[in-house]
Amino acid sequence: MCTKLLALSQKVKQMKTRTFNVPADSIVEFAEILSEYELEGVIVGTSDDEIEINVDYEPEEHSQAILDMIEHIENLNGEFQEEDEDEDE
């Protein structure tokens, strides 16, 4: 029993949390990425145009998934910035 608790506590220590600010228009795409990598997200906040989501993950198993999600959000932010610039003209 003690061995199981020790193993569980070590696993919990290895968990990390990443917070993503996801554009509200892209929440479905983000949820699909989470599902694809079998991760779960928890909504921790909202604003008019973004949803703040915490994702718990094990770095050894999901680091590539987290990098893919970061890249996806950065690409979305670039698209939205370009759209904003076009609207300003």
Image (cartoon, grey):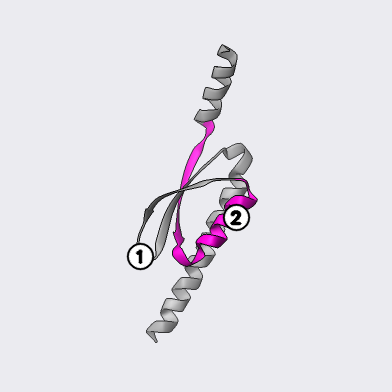
What is the x, y in percent for residue 54?
46, 47
Three-letter amino acid code at the position of disc 2: Ile
Q: Is residue 23 visible?
A: yes
Residue at left offset 62%, top offset 46%:
38
Three-letter amino acid code at the position of disc 1: Asp
Q: Secondary structure at mark 2?
A: helix
Real-space Cα distance between discs 2 and 1?
Answer: 23 Å
Residue at left offset 56%, top offset 28%:
11
The relative height of residue 39 versus residue 84 in the rendered view (above or below) is above
Q: Nearer the viewer, residue 87 or 52?
A: 52
The relative height of residue 54 versus residue 72 in the rendered view (above or below) is above
Question: Disc 1 designates what residue?
Answer: 48
Label 1: how many residues lie within 10 Å, few (<14), some (14-19) or many (20+)? few
Query: Where is the N terminus found, in terms of image quarters?
Result: top right
What is the x, y in percent for residue 82?
47, 76
Mark identifier at residue 40: none
